[in-house]
Amino acid sequence: MAAQLSLARPTRRRLVRLDRKTGNPDLRIRCRIVLKVAAGMSCAEAARALGCAPSTAARSVARFRWHGEAGLIDGRSDNGRRKVDADVRGAIRAILARRAPAWGFTRPTWTLEAITQVIERVQHLQLSVGHLWKVLKGMRVRWRRPRPVVACPWKTAARERRLAELERLAQTPRPGEAMFYADEVDIHLNPKIGPDWMLPGIRHLVVTPGKNEKRYLAGAYDPRQKRLIYVAGERKASWLFLSLLRALLDACVGVRVIHVILDNYIIHKSHLTLAWLRERGVRLRLHFLPPYCPDSNRIERLWWDLHANVTRNHMCRTMRELMQAVHRYLAHRFELVQVVAYAA
């Protein structure tokens, strides 16, 4: 049976305005419950429509009957200062910014129990594990896999100076010059395994072919013109990189100097590459990044997107099928600009 609740027009308009402007999600739900019940729904129907518990809807309507609009305010608002405030959240961020061993733990990864111990030590505040979990969820702290990196052997000043020089070169190319970021990417027939959304109790299976096959792309990305030039091959060797350089020369007819920012991989500096550059690379200028600085190479993000959209958890049964998917994705990604693909 539908609950009998009537609202005066000014009251209804105030509730609608409060629903639209409030930043409190609980207050927003209570406003919508009252509005739906006043529109003729029962408490159970309003709860189903809003995705909340029927008891929440019934309690909100009862408080509105007794206290009017004031009954929509959280009754705990007069309980005093919250236990976890902005200062405590800032302390939690500072704690998580350092690894667990830095706080005296032998375990290399954090646990909720360890975090509560450090909070009690630093803030003199006792939090239960359940309360801490809710706080971390509200702070959007996530349980994630760390990313392995290799530290650059250069001194910080020298590394930053070199990166700044390359950034200035990329931002302000001279007339008649072009700028590209170059790198290679591995394509494996055995899928890269990555996270996915799954229903409770169900775990997706990724069927692998067992015997792995590999292909390689060597690409050059111009972030100013949103242009990609790439070649494909079965081996990551000097000839693959030279095929990319030939593709660059063919695609940039009329360009006086082609600047290429790239890492220190061996095929970029091999004897074959250096001999070819002396003979045919008059228009090419190679600029090498400091060692182990992949984040400064803008094409790395493009390869990451390629893995996320094509190779991760893929269901291709043959390398031919997988490479067709790779080419389709790159052609779609750059469909409004020039894409030059050479079969190396």
Image (cartoon, rainbow, N blue to C red):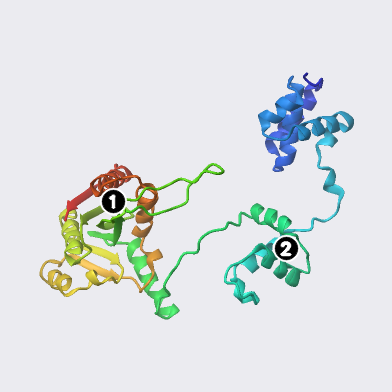
The N terminus - image quarter: top right
Residue indicated by mark 1: 227
Q: Residue 88 shows which numbered tag?
A: 2
> Which residue corresponds to the image point at 73% horizontal and 71% vertical from the top-left?
122
Counting from the top left corner in percent of width and height, residue 197 is at 50, 45
In the rendered image, which quarter is residue 98 located in? bottom right
Q: In this view, does 3 lie to the left or right of 270?
A: right
SS for dot 2: helix
> Which is more toward the observer, 63 or 117?
117
Q: Which three-letter amino acid code belongs to the residue tagged 1?
A: Arg
Q: In this view, does 214 lie above or below 320?
A: below
Question: Of the residues under marks 1 and 2, which one precedes in the sequence?
Answer: 2
> Which is more toward the observer, 317 or 254?
317
SS for dot 1: strand
Q: Is residue 282 left or right of residue 288?
A: left
Res 323 seen here: yes
Q: Is residue 37 above or below residue 336?
A: above
